[in-house]
Image (cartoon, rainbow, N blue to C red):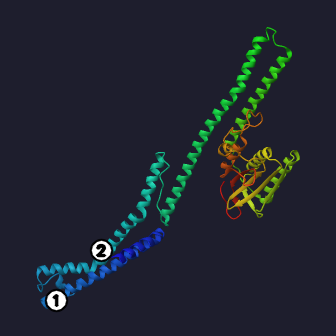
Amino acid sequence: MDWLEEKMEQMRIFLQEKSLVKSLVCYLCIGMVGVVTFYWITRNMCLAWMEVISKRYQTSITFSSLNIWKGNSVGNTERWMLIMVNFLNEYCLYIYTLICFITVGKIFLEKRIKPAVEEITRGIKYINLGDYGHEIAWYSQDEMGMLCREMEQMRKNLLREKRDRWRQQDEQRKINAAFAHDIRTPLTVIQGYTEFLQRYVPKGRVSEELLLEKLADMHEQEERLFRFSTTMTTIQNIDKWDISGAWYKVSEILGQFHAVIQGVSHSQDKEICLHSAIPEQKLLLDQNLLMEVFENLLSNAVRYAYKHIWVEAVLVDHEFTVFVRDDGQGFSERALRSGMDTYFSEEENSREHFGIGLSICRMLCENHGGRLTLQNSVKQGAISAASLTVGTEKGEEKI
């Protein structure tokens, strides 16, 4: 019995790995073997009955004998038995074939179609209810298994999009809260100066020097508010950035990097080195987005580097990564945790930088199917790695 169960399990696995058409043919072949076997058994049983009755009544009875239908050579019971035997002999093959088709069809539906359909129906039911956490699992190599895997991939994509929307909404709430918090200070300062001037200027108690000083402070706070509004507009535009991919040679991309590095080097007393071992080929990507990310990372490195900055471009499969390393102090523990959050900055009351550079890079990388990572170098300094999902000449990848 163990041997038989082992063979049955092997047969089940063999059929499960075949396509629906091939497995249906296998089912039908197995069913037809059963039909031939039962037909052979039934045919021999009928012949045996005919021989028994012939010997009993000492007469020659064949399937085509009229004694089956009339005559008195056999009894009434035997006559009806012979009619039944003759019927089975003539029609059992058709009967067994019909039973085979019905049985094979039912088994095929129950084993190969119905479970996958039930799994897909269950998954769609949960998705319609807004629950994307239930896996659509039907592990077979046939078309139904492929359909289940496609549905599972769709579920994962919907779940990822929903999580992205939750994260974006949460991030937007944080941005709004941070914006409301940060503009409160300049508004409070402007309000205080305005009340002061309204109270004491009419009384002549404010000198011209003090008046100009207060107006200059108010103007500075107004400019800060304007920069805040510009920052908010920039963030909103990043969310609406439409990816527009085109084919670019690796040499063209590196040439753009080199041009940016040359421009930065002219205004900074720091050495910037560019290295790449990517073989010459074409990449499908959004060059404007890539350069925006690169310029932000390079600008951030220039601010904190002592003397040297290293830039390296790497391509692994469909992932294009730009590493920017400096020889500065590196990221603090707080920056490693929250450096990519909007408005994060370790510079207190910074008038020029509002902590959105790395946040913009992160959002752009994610829009391009990639990611941004921050880490400290083992030797010295900080490393920012921006990865984008790109298409290559070997196989196009959607972005």
Q: Callout 1: helix, strand or loop?
A: helix
Residue type, numbered disc 1: Ser
Q: Residue 341 carries which label?
A: none
Q: Where is residue 88 in the image (x, y as percent from the top left)?
A: 25, 78
Residue type, numbered disc 2: Ile
Give the camera-side residue of 330 and 389.
330
Q: How many marks?
A: 2
Q: Where is residue 310 in the image (x, y as percent from the top left)?
A: 79, 54
Residue linked to disc 1: 54
Q: Callout 2: helix, strand or loop?
A: helix
Q: Residue 95 carries which label?
A: 2
The quadrant of the rendering that contains the N terminus is bottom left
Whether residue 95 sits left or right of residue 272 in the image: it is: left
Callout 1 environment at 10 Å: few (<14), some (14 to 19), or many (20+)? Answer: some
Q: Where is residue 189 in the image (x, y as percent from the top left)?
A: 73, 23
Give the camera-side residue of 129 and 68.
129
Whether residue 42 sits left or right of residue 292 in the image: it is: left
Whether residue 80 sits left or right of residue 159 in the image: it is: left
- Which of the 4 quarters of the picture holds residue 87? bottom left
What residue do we see at 82% from left, 51% from top?
Answer: 308
Dot 2 or dot 1: first in sequence order is 1
